[in-house]
Image (spheres, rainbow, N blue to C red):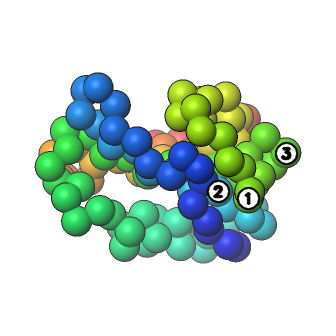
Amino acid sequence: MIISKLHPYSEVDNLGQKYKYYVVQNFEFGNKQQFEELKEFAENNLDNDYNKFEGYAVGFYKESSRAPIDFKQTESDLILWHGSDLIYSFEWQNGKFLNYYEYKDGKIVSK
């Protein structure tokens, strides 16, 4: 499994919430070891000031034709266009871990 930054890599919305995006190569649904690696990666790559944001989320997308490893879209709202490729999001609120969500085909399958 290879994790790379997805462009746009991060953004802060008008509500003061920060989002970071990554694309994952060779992802396998249901692989617990990969889940643990993604969780550890998210925790180890938090911004130093993540606790200053009301909401902070790290999203992982599987590599696909819509979210390729060399994706260069500059319109940040188009990241939602790739919703069916979202596999995990990890979320913090005011510096405290809130929850994680697992997705498949654009729908939450567990939290």
Horizontal and vertical percent position of residue 14: 29, 26
Horizontal and vertical percent position of residue 20: 44, 50
Q: Is residue 15 left or right of residue 61?
A: left
Q: Is residue 28 left or right of residue 98?
A: right
Horizontal and vertical percent position of residue 104: 68, 40
The kind of residue tagged 3 is: Ser
Q: Circles 1 and 2: CB distance less than 8 Å?
A: yes
Disc number for residue 4: none
Horizontal and vertical percent position of residue 76: 53, 34
Rounded to the nearest angstrom, the CA distance separating label 3 from label 2 is: 12 Å
**Residue linked to disc 1:** 69
The kind of residue tagged 1 is: Ile
Q: Quadrant of the N terminus?
A: bottom right
Mark 3 vs mark 2: which is more N-terminal? Answer: 2
Q: Residue at x 53, y 73 (%)?
A: 37
User: Tag 3's secondary structure?
Assistant: loop
The kind of residue tagged 2 is: Val
**Residue linked to disc 2:** 23
Q: Residue at x 60, y 73 (%)?
A: 33
Q: Residue at x 78, y 40 (%)?
A: 66
Mark 1 vs mark 2: which is more N-terminal? Answer: 2
Crowd rating for badge 3 (residues with CA inside 10 Å; few <14, some 14–19, many 20+): few
Disc number for residue 65: 3
Q: Is residue 36 visible?
A: no
Crowd rating for badge 2 (residues with CA inside 10 Å; few <14, some 14–19, many 20+): many
Which of 34/86 is in front? Answer: 86
